[in-house]
């Protein structure tokens, strides 16, 4: 899958950010093309599941073919075709034998039920363990991803329209979430047990971006160690590598570690 050139990136944003671009452009801020990657960081999670599926298939000498397509929402015909598949126009979307499968968590469950095989799972078969995985998938979305997105949204506003109280509240929620995750990780390798799961697919993008606004507290040693395990997981590392061309468009890039983004090389 090829990446768009700098001059093409604006054509790949959705309606929300095309509109945002015009609004911010009115105030003289031209750095809006970050939207291609940051608008939907949840796309990271199913991409991790696909990478995991490909990796496990390779380990078992089983071919897994996934046709990854770069969606050009600036092309009217391509956009209309996408809306015909999924009227909300939101991403991600998996098309499996003509059946549209939307929403990150649903895509991951679909991949496991229909394509994983071989006993490899991102959601445990045992009901109680599966419930724990689904719970932490939701907790990362609600209490890490959501405040992170609020902090990003505030950066997009003209300086005079920014809301310090909302920013403070988002940081408070993140601090609470960090402490909650630290407690959950006691005695665990991964957030919902000993095996990498859908919950960790949700954790990776959430913590990756949240840490650019509120660094992980050094005293929360389990959380910090977990973050390193996430970043070193082969599927996560592969997806981060694929995302590197877009980090220069991320509003919070100043908080990215140099191992992920070198501004002098952008």
Image (cartoon, rainbow, N blue to C red):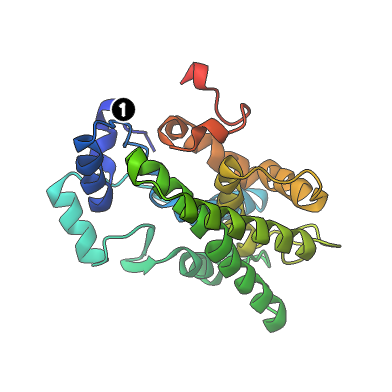
- Residue 228, placed above or below residue 102: above
- Residue 51, placed above or below residue 180: above
Residue 244 is at least partly visible in this image: yes
Q: Residue at x 81, y 47 (%)?
A: 219
Q: Depth check: 84 or 229 in front? A: 229
Residue 26 place in picture, x, y as percent: 19, 37
Residue 63 is at least partly visible in this image: no
Q: Residue at x 22, y 45 (%)?
A: 18
Q: Which residue is tagged 1?
A: 5
View extreme (right): residue = 187
Residue 8 place in picture, x, y as percent: 25, 31
Q: Depth check: 68 or 13 in front? A: 13
| Image quadrant where one finds the N terminus | top left
Task: Determine which quarter of the picture holds residue 136.
Answer: bottom right
Q: Secondary structure at mark 1?
A: loop
The total of numbered circles placed on residues is 1
Q: Is residue 75 left or right of residue 132?
A: left
Residue 99 place in picture, x, y as percent: 33, 69
View extreme (left): residue = 76
- Residue 183, placed above or below residue 63: below
Q: Residue at x 57, y 34 (%)?
A: 256
Residue 259 place in picture, x, y as percent: 63, 28
Q: Residues within 10 Å of mark 1 (few under 14, many from 20)?
A: few
Q: Is residue 179 left or right of residue 266?
A: right
Q: Is residue 258 left or right of residue 20?
A: right
């Amino acid at each position: 899958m090829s990446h768009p050139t700098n001059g093409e990136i604006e054509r790949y944003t959705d309606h929300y950010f095309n509109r945002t671009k015009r609004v911010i452009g009115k105030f003289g801020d031209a750095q809006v093309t970050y939207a291609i990657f940051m608008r939907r960081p949840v796309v990271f999670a199913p991409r991790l599941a696909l990478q995991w599926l490909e990796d496990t298939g390779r380990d078992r000498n089983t071919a897994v073919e996934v046709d990854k397509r770069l969606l050009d929402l600036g092309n009217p015909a391509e956009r209309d075709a996408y809306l015909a598949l999924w009227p909300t126009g939101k991403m991600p979307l998996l098309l499996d034998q003509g059946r549209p499968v939307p929403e990150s968590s649903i895509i991951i469950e679909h991949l496991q039920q229909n394509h994983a095989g071989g006993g490899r799972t991102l959601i445990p078969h045992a009901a109680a363990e599966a419930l724990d995985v689904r719970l932490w998938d939701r907790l990362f979305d609600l209490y890490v991803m959501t405040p992170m997105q609020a902090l990003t949204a505030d950066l997009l506003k003209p300086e005079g329209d920014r809301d310090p109280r909302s920013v403070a509240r988002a940081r408070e929620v993140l601090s609470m979430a960090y402490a909650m995750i630290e407690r959950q990780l006691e005695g665990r390798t991964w957030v919902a047990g000993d095996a990498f799961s859908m919950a960790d697919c949700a954790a990776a993008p959430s913590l990756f971006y949240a840490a650019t606004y509120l660094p992980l507290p050094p005293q929360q040693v389990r959380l910090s160690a977990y973050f390193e395990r996430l970043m070193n997981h082969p599927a996560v590392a592969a997806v981060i590598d694929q995302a590197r061309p877009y980090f220069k468009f991320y509003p919070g890039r100043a908080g990215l570690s140099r191992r992920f983004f070198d501004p002098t090389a952008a």
